[in-house]
Image: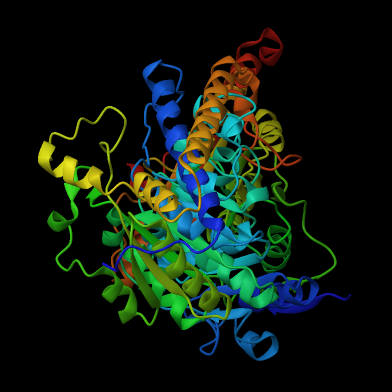
Amino acid sequence: MNAPHLPTNTAALGRYRMMRRIRSFEERVGELFLKGESAGSMLHLSIGEEAVVGMTDAMQAGDTFTTHHRGHGVFLGRGADPKRMMAEIAGKEDGYCRGKGGSMHIADRALGHLGANAIVGGGIPHIVGAGITYRNGGTGQISVAFFGDGAMSQGILYESMNMAALWHLPVIFCCINNQYGMGTRVDRSAGHRDFPARAAAFGLNTARADGADVEAVHDAARTLVQAARDGKPGYLEIDAYRFYGHARMDKSPYRTADEEATGRARDPLSAARTRLSAHGLATDDDLTLIDAEAVTEMDAALSHAIAATPPALSTMFQDVYAPGTPAPRPQAERLTAILSEGARA
Amino acid sequence: MSLTQSTYREAIRQALLDAMHADPSVILIGEEVGLYGGAYGVTKGLIDIFGANRVIDAPISEPAIVGAAVGAAMTGLRPVAELMYVDFIGMTMDQLANQAAKSRYMFGGQIGVPMVLRTQGGTGRSAAAQHSQSLEAWVMHTPGLRLIMPATVNDAYHLLRQSLTQPDPVVFIEHKGLYTLKGDLDPDTPDGAWGQPVTRRKGSDLVILSYSRMLHESLAAADRLAASGIEAEVIDLRCLNPLDEAPLIEAVKRTGRAMVVTEAVVTGSVASEIAARLTESCFDWLEEPILRVGGEDIPIPVSPALERGSIPSATLIHDTAQWLVTRKAPEWAA
């Protein structure tokens, strides 16, 4: 790992603020789940992975991305409205996907989120297609796939890396290595754990950054992003630690308290706070205010999600296909037609 | 434009050519679609006209070919992904069924996937068990996908052009045994609207429902039935999703007898689905059960004799239809 990075501008303060918002969001969304207000039975928290903001901050408006199970932080980092996110996770009508997607399928076309994915690695090849669109169109956009170390065992990742390198696509594969694919630690799933070497073997630009150091992540990300815009795809690995279990109810019986304590000591949020304070970029009062604002904002998001209206039952038939094209026929309608006296003439 | 003679293969190539001229967002991506010209020669020369950015030779990576098409469609292109054989669709099922088919719905209508997956299936070239299947039921079973299976030269052209204007993913399954079929192509006049069946032969005694290559066997059987005084109506389904049931129901009620003929194995098949739907809607009008005539429930063998014997023939269709109408058991049923 590199030596601790010294933040040099006030953008670092913005990144701290975003990391704090992500942490608070995840804490509140965890509450949503415990209150029984989460629509989904599955909730994957990204606490411990907030340094991904170093990557999301290196992207520009118009860039697109896909995420997988643990993507709340990435989406917030790209500008998501926590109220609409929380409402989606609660399965409500004003959620990003009108209550159809939930935590694992959240998306927002306007912010470039091409979709969260509940299939490990399932969203990775979509950036290849997006990369073709941007390369052919000369739009200057890039597309980034965010995934965990679990996806490093999926074949489609390597098919996608090969295509990205072969076709000089403006894309980045961003692995947030939190050391666990569900309950299996990475040293029990990977025969060769130098993941950047795998990416380099396909001809990608690669970098690895300390997931406890958001500024180090940002530096690595900026370099990769610039190269990607020039048609040289990249791979960034953020070495992090997943503070909690795979999903909200997972008590992590597969790891020790000692390991968790060591992992949680590498907290990107407290590390950033300490450094901002130590280098005089913010006073303790400033930082405390930022923390309080985040809590207030996410409290409001939580209340909003709980109070929001669930979607009408009839909306279940919407959006299977595009508006104006033949849609699925409700079963009741079909049965009525068959059973009605009229049909029997 | 005037009527021209074309092959099924050439009609599909012409459709791609015309679509790419008309819409700069149309791209092709697949194994051997460029320099090689397609495993069955369908995309021959297109790379010379449109360049390697629009006719993209992909590595042998079926899941990522379909996945890249999904991403390209999400971001504004209109990709035509080619899967060399429908048998490989299982490798791509995550991208097809979990991604392409579900994005619009999961994301609350925000992100559609207007792509076409072109592939080919069926028997007739002794390609054996892993290169000869008819897997349309796998596609039809998945909400979110559209499914087209053209049987004629004119349909090969028009249904593909029309598929390239649809807002949702379309799986377009050609038949390897039809590429050399010759017929009339009228680039200005489709046989019918996309998504709707077309009556290929009128008749009052029974209705035979079919699609893809089995349409031709069914028509041959209908000719032979006519020689013995039985008039079979033959309907080409063309599009299995959306399936316009109204004209099918009308024909079944009118004739009281129906059979569905497919090349795919019968168990869990498209034929089973259609027979069930028509039974639900037409029970009181039926003189006989709706019969399914399809492929034997076996992997396709390489021996041409076994391969031919495993799928319906005009004779089998004829004899079954005759039994439906006359209750005269065929020789093989004795």
Instruction: Please indicate whether residue A311 sits to the left or right of residue A283 in the image.
Output: right
Residue A90 x %, y %: 51, 24
Q: Quadrant of residue B246?
A: top right
Instruction: Please indicate whether residue A272 sits to the left or right of residue B247 in the image.
Output: left
Residue A335 x %, y %: 59, 17
Residue at 50% from the left image edge and 64% from the top image edge: A8
User: Is the residue B30 above or below the residue B164 in the image?
Assistant: below
Foreground of the two, B134 or A37: A37
Instruction: Please indicate whether residue A243 sits to the left or right of residue A78 in the image.
Output: left
Q: Quadrant of residue A344?
A: top right
Indicate how the structure is coloured in the image: rainbow
User: Is the residue A210 above or below the residue A228 in the image?
Assistant: above
Residue B250 x %, y %: 71, 32
Residue at 33% from the left image edge and 79% from the top image edge: A200
Q: Quadrant of the C terminus of chain A?
A: top right
Q: Is residue B123 visible?
A: no
